[in-house]
Image (cartoon, rainbow, N blue to C red):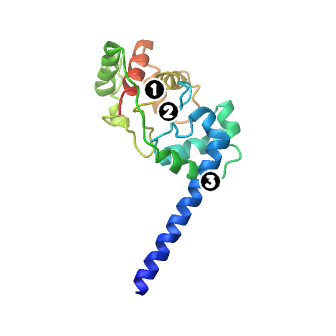
C-alpha cells in the first residue's frame, strides 16, 4: 500500500512539473514566438524556421546563443535576451513535442539533384554527403538540427549565411561545406530536405 501511495504521489509530482513547464512555454509562445514560428512551431512564413519536432538540446543551444549574442539576429537577440534557463528548457520541450511537418515538392528534377548531394555529396567539389551529420532522413541529432520538412527558403538562407560567415555560431564545419556549394546546389538541397518527413 505504501509503495502504491508513493508511486501515486511521484506521478502527481512529475505531472505537475510537466504541466507547469507547459504553462510557462505556452505563455511565452503566445506572447512572443507565435508571430514568427506559429503556435505549434509550424512557421507559416518561409523566412522563419519551423520549430515543430526540432531537437530539444539543439533549441536550447540556439536560444542560449541568441541570448548571449553568439548567434546574431536582430529579432531573436531581442526575444531571447530576457529568457531564463528554465524558460528556454520549457520552450525546447514544447516545440520538440509538436509533430514535424513537410512540404510538397513540385520541382522533382531539382529535388533529385538535392537528393543526390544530400546522400552522396559532390566528389568533384569535395562536398561530403549531408547524411553524414544530419542522418538519412534529415532527422538530425541532439546537437545538430532536424532539416526534414524545414522551409526551403530558410535552409537556403542559412547555407548562404554559413558560406559568407554571416551565421555567427556553429560556423566552422558548415562554412567549409557551404562555401563550396553552387547556388543551384543550395537550392536543390534546400528543396529536397523541405519534402522529407
Query: Residue 144 at what x, y percent from top left?
Result: 44, 40
Front-most of residues 177 and 64: 64
Residue annotated with mark 3? 24
- What residue is at 30 percent from the left and 35 percent from the top? 136
For residue 172, the mark is: 2
Q: Which label's residue is closer to the chain start, 3 or 2?
A: 3
| Circles 3 and 2 in contact, beta carbons < 8 Å | no
Q: Is residue 174 above or below residue 6?
A: above
Q: Marks 3 and 2: which is nearer the front?
A: 3
- Specify whether residue 68 is in view: no
Label 3: element kind: helix
Answer above or below: position of 62 versus 6: above
Q: State how far apart marks 2 and 1 are (Cα).
A: 7 Å
Q: Which residue is mark 1?
A: 176
Residue 16 image-quadrant placement? bottom right
Please rate how many residues cluster around mark 2, counting C-alpha atoms within 10 Å: few if below 14, some from 14 to 19, many from 20. Answer: few
Q: Quadrant of the N terminus?
A: bottom left
Extreme residue toward the bottom, this view:
1
Residues at marks 2 and 1 touching, judged by CB atoms closer than 8 Å: yes
Mark 1–mark 3 Cα distance, whole angstroms, equals: 39 Å
Q: CA distance from mark 3 to mark 2?
A: 34 Å
Please identify the quadrant where the C terminus is shown. Answer: top left
User: Foreground residue, 86 or 176?
Assistant: 86
Mark 1 Cα shell of 10 Å, populated few (<14), some (14-19), many (≥20): some
Q: Earlier in the sequence, mark 1 or mark 3?
A: 3
Residue at horizontal 47 percent and vertical 70 percent from the top = 11
**Residue 196 shows in this picture:** yes
Q: Residue visible at 67% across and 32% down?
A: 75
Amino acid at each position: 500500500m505504501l509503495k502504491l501511495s508513493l508511486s501515486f504521489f511521484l506521478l502527481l509530482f512529475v505531472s505537475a512539473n510537466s504541466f507547469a513547464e507547459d504553462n510557462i512555454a505556452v505563455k511565452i509562445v503566445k506572447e512572443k514566438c507565435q508571430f514568427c514560428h506559429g503556435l505549434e512551431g509550424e512557421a507559416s512564413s518561409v523566412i522563419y524556421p519551423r520549430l515543430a519536432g526540432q531537437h530539444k538540446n539543439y533549441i536550447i543551444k540556439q536560444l542560449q546563443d541568441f541570448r548571449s549574442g553568439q548567434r546574431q539576429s536582430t529579432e531573436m537577440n531581442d526575444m531571447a535576451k530576457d529568457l531564463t534557463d528554465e524558460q528556454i528548457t520549457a520552450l525546447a520541450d514544447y516545440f520538440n513535442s509538436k509533430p514535424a511537418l513537410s512540404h510538397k515538392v513540385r520541382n522533382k528534377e531539382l529535388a533529385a539533384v538535392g537528393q543526390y548531394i544530400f546522400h552522396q555529396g559532390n566528389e568533384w567539389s569535395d562536398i561530403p554527403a549531408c547524411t553524414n551529420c544530419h542522418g538519412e532522413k534529415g532527422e538530425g541529432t541532439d546537437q545538430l538540427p532536424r532539416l526534414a520538412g524545414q522551409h526551403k527558403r530558410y535552409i537556403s538562407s542559412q547555407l548562404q549565411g554559413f558560406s559568407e560567415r554571416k551565421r555567427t555560431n556553429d560556423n566552422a564545419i558548415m562554412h567549409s561545406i557551404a562555401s563550396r556549394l553552387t547556388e543551384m546546389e543550395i537550392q536543390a538541397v534546400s528543396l529536397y530536405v523541405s519534402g522529407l518527413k
